[in-house]
Amino acid sequence: MKHYRFISVFAAAALLLSACDDVVNIPATDRLGENAIWSGDEAILDQYVIGLYGAVREKSTLKMNESQFTDCMTDLLKDADWTQSRRYNRKVYNYEPFTSDDASILGNWGDSYTRIRRFNEFFRDSEKYSNLYRSDFLKIRLAEVRFMRAMQYFYLIRVYGGVVLRDKYEGPEANDKARLSEAESWQWVIDEIKAAAPDLPVAWDASNFSRLTQIAAYGFLSRAALYAGQWDEVINAANQCETLGAGLASTYAEVFSDKYSKENLMIVDFAPTGLNHNADQIFRPNGDNAYHGNKGFGLPMTPTAEFADAFEMADGTAFSWTAYNANPAAWGNDPYSGREPRFYATIIYNNEDWEGRKIESYAGGKDGIMTFVKATSGAATSTTTGYYFRKYITENDDSWDLAGSSHFDIMLRYGEVLLNKAEALARKDWAANKTDALKALNDIRNRVGLPAKSASTLDEFMDLIEHERIVELGGENFRFWDLRRWKKGVDRLNNKSFHGVWITKDDTSPGGFKYSECDIDDGSTRVFMERYYCFALPAAELNNNSALGGVNNPGW
């Protein structure tokens, strides 16, 4: 079994015996003292590089901080929380509006530049002490750090547009510095990843399986280039992934159950007694509480009806409540029978067999359903949509009962890369690339046994891409960012409300249950403004960096 494609932050940190929120508690070299890190001992320097991987783990969805689970700000997931701990609802209803002071819960300016400074310190010191190390050893470590620095700039550009480029260690004299344009910023990221990729290993030895590889770099390059609109770069990077051995898992469920799957190009690994998270308490059906130590489930993030209904039937026809209600017997009196495989790997639904019992996400059932209310006292402790989200929990796993959750997080997988390639082919030249674009998209569908799709125009194809990215990547936090880069956020989210399925036990109804649409927005509509396509620069940066001229992004 090959173990070389992944980032296992826990495995890396375990090498050091000392872990903290930054994975390894090693201060920057200008505070610790250069000689402590750059002593010529390769093991010590390697440990320092491993510590820098904290910048990657911080972007893990399962870290569960307030900025990462952005699908809760879209039509795909509903967050039951109305507190300061997770503020998605406060944002989508404009109760706590985004302001010109910064990007609020999405803001990452200060954190990213702090990490970038650490990376630049590493490059600065490497020039002084390179003669103390084998050239092949140092080349790989420099490539790792170079890639991680480029990733930090990716996350900055995604939120703010053009950035202040700090690509080397600078003192106070370089404080005032103008921004690059957004296009220039993306170009720098693309060039950096392309420069780092060849120096990364194709494979690490077994003891270092968790480190960055070429395949991770090219996969991430396909993502960055898609945002930049550089279609050739997307296509070439995707092709490089395939050449290096990436491919789709044999089944969709395997992606989320097997961290060693060839589809998973970059993961963050966790362990119950080491670096862990609380996904089980957030995503598990509420009825599991009694069987898992009564740990206290609550404030779940659950799939909307819009998300659940997007999954097709196994034969490729669209799901329809109208069709079900017209002839329930043809469905075995179960609206959730006969769906495509991605539905069952993503959604936990009423009356499903689960850990030796039936899911009861109906009113009064063990797993319950509650009405979402915009008030702290009204925060729901069970689903508000009639569904639960499955991807980040493992059925019949009780290892987390006495410790933390350890399900791995996928930072990058080939399914995304293939959809990136399909979109890039189509948008580069629809007439010339139609066949190849459809093949890439239909490879995704073929994996789950769905019939191929066709399209006559680029607009039709982009509708197919949007649908496939919902059902293939839903809950993996692409939707919010996709809608921004497509400039579809206003159309899809603004002045809209979304729904769940209210379920009641009813012996007179087919299958013993009655299903009806329910509101999950407490009578409100969502807010997504045009200016959300590029969020405000931090007020502190505008005030402290005179080269910015006090000019903020449009609309702020």
Image (cartoon, helix red, strand yellow):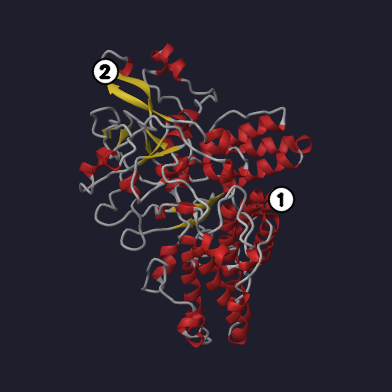
Depth check: give the residue in front, 556 or 260: 556
Q: Is residue 135 left or right of residue 361?
A: right
Task: Report how many numbered discs are placed on residues in the image.
Answer: 2
Crowd band around label 1 with a 10 angstrom C-alpha radius: few (<14), some (14–19), many (20+): some
Residue 506, label in figure: 2
Residue 48, label in figure: none
Report which residue position mark 1 lands on: 230
Of the image marks 2 and 1, the number of the one nearer the N terminus: 1
The image quarter containing residue 388 is top left
The image quarter containing residue 343 is top left
Depth check: give the residue in front, 425 or 206: 425
Q: Please state which amino acid type lies under the numbered disc 2.
A: Asp
Mark 1: secondary structure: loop
Using the numbered discs, state the Cα–Cα distance from disc 2 to disc 1 in whole angstroms. Answer: 55 Å
Q: Position of residue 203 (x, y in %)?
A: 57, 64
Q: Please state which amino acid type lies under the numbered disc 1.
A: Gln
Asked if residue 317 shows in the view, the reply is yes
